[in-house]
Image (cartoon, grey):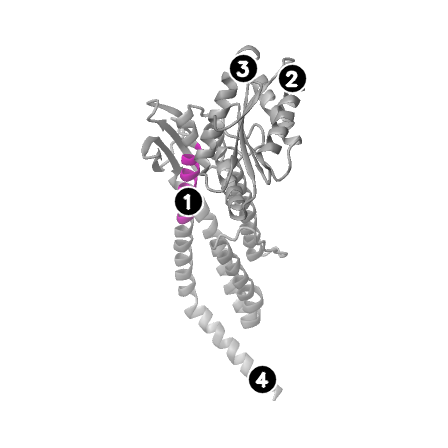
């Protein structure tokens, strides 16, 4: 019986050897070509997806810059995007001011990139504000295809030699099982599950490729997280920006209206802030803004929402707070700001417009009421709190 098994195994090994020598070389070569073509399509799809995502994020960031002619946030986003080697050129054109807010390119006379361009109009309330354009390097995929080709060649050669030497067990343990795990990893990545890690312990090609994929996953996860945070966070103060504010306040309004709980909304505006910028410089103005945000943040609850929605304009939303309590809190905040020692050594005051939410008002209406109350506070001499409607 043992000799029969040995004979059968020997026969199978000879058969596999013949198959691998005669019939496997051509399929391997064909498989190499197909794998490279699939990889090329996947890389192009990744490039197209990245291209479109970058354009969408830039268009959202550019909207505020086009309406307020304040390109700082857009400039920060452009600086971040240009760090990616895939992006070659970015343009932000304002139709409102008929000029380019930003126009940067990596193209030089010595270095020219074949590019793919995407252009998107930026509109608000049916009005065309301008457009944004993002160009990416079309040849970005070439070195990656070459690298993948070398890895796949090594992979197929390893499979071929392993099949010659060890037949089925080696193919299963050294090729099929890790390849199956690698494919599961690729499927997880293709589904966008960037938070799912894959740990590889070996030093073979599969493990190195798996580690490379996991490194790519980690970098993509951090990049997209950072881009999401940058899209909703004011870089100077660390508070939510206008987009982040609108994303959070709707939930607070819905909860307040759903459960009939009180909520108040206030707009805070630093008095004579232009004087600070003009006489002490914008860096000092930035320090005042950061210090002001810190002073207010330390004296409100974690459940309150404080956001910077303009140059020196902030919005404070206080859930579970009746108007009477909000008035007392805002008066204390106003006094605290007036008594605080700011970096430029001058007194800083704040004007505040306040309104309550009673379950049916829309956010735009609340903002309008609070803004009119703020305007009334400015008219009456600043450094005061006014309850709207006025």
How far apart marks 2 and 1 lie (CA) works out to 47 Å
Q: Give the range drawn in magenta.
A: 45-61
How far apart marks 1 and 4 lie (CA) works out to 54 Å
Q: For marks 2 and 3, give the one nearer the viewer.
A: 3
Mark positioned earlier in the residue sequence (2 or 3): 2
The structure residue drawn at horizontal position 44% and vertical position 34%, both measured from the top left corner, is: 365
How far apart marks 2 and 3 lie (CA) works out to 24 Å
Residue 192 vs residue 365, the one in the foreground: 365
Label 1: element kind: helix
Q: What secondary structure do most residues of the magenta stretch adopt?
A: helix
Q: Which percent across, then down, holds residue 360?
A: 46, 42
Residue 223 vs residue 166, the one in the foreground: 223
Give the residue number, with chain letter if any, for mark 2.
Answer: 343
Q: Which percent across, then down, holds residue 355?
A: 52, 32
Give the residue number, with chain letter if any, for mark 3.
Answer: 381
State the image quarter where residue 87 is shown.
top left
Label 2: element kind: loop
The structure residue drawn at horizontal position 40% and vertical position 24%, both measured from the top left corner, is: 101
Mark 3 surroundings within 10 Å by alpha-carbon count, few (fewer than 14), some (14 through 19), many (20 or more): few
Mark 1 surroundings within 10 Å by alpha-carbon count, few (fewer than 14), some (14 through 19), many (20 or more): many
Mark positioned earlier in the residue sequence (4 or 3): 4
How far apart marks 1 and 3 lie (CA) works out to 56 Å
Give the residue number, with chain letter if any, for mark 4.
Answer: 5
């Amino acid at each position: 019986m043992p000799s029969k098994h040995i004979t059968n195994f020997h026969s199978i090994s000879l058969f596999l050897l013949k198959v691998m020598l005669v019939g496997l070389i051509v399929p391997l070569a064909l498989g190499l070509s197909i794998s490279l073509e699939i990889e090329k399509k996947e890389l192009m799809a990744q490039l197209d997806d990245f291209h479109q995502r970058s354009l969408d994020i830039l268009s959202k960031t550019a909207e505020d810059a086009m309406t307020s002619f304040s390109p700082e946030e857009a400039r920060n986003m452009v600086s971040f995007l240009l760090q990616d080697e895939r992006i070659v050129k970015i343009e932000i054109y304002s139709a409102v001011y008929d000029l380019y807010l930003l126009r940067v390119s990596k193209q030089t006379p010595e270095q020219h990139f074949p590019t793919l361009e995407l252009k998107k109009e930026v509109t608000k309330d049916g009005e065309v504000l301008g457009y944004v354009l993002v160009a990416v390097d079309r040849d970005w995929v070439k070195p990656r295809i070459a690298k993948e080709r070398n890895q796949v060649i090594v992979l197929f050669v390893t499979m071929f030699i392993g099949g010659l030497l060890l037949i089925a067990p080696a193919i299963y343990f050294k090729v099929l099982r890790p390849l199956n795990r690698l494919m599961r990893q690729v499927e997880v990545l293709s589904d966008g599950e960037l938070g799912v890690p894959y740990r590889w312990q070996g030093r073979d090609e599969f493990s190195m490729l798996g580690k490379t994929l996991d490194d790519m996953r980690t970098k993509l996860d951090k990049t997209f997280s950072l881009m999401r945070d940058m899209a909703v966070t004011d870089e100077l103060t660390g508070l939510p920006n206008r987009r982040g504010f609108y994303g959070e306040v709707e939930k607070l309004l819905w909860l307040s209206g759903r459960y009939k709980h009180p909520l108040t909304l206030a707009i805070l505006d630093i008095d004579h802030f232009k004087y600070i910028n003009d006489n002490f410089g914008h860096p000092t103005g930035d320090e005042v803004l950061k210090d002001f945000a810190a002073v207010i943040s330390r004296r409100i609850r974690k459940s309150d929402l404080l956001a910077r929605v303009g140059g020196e304009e902030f919005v404070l939303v206080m859930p579970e707070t009746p108007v009477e309590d909000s008035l007392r809190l805002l008066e204390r905040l106003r006094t605290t700001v007036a008594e605080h020692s700011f970096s430029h050594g001058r007194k800083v005051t704040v004007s505040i417009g306040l309104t309550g939410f009673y379950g049916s008002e829309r956010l735009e209406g609340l903002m309008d009421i609070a803004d009119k109350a703020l305007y009334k506070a400015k008219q009456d001499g600043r450094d005061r709190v006014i309850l709207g409607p006025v």
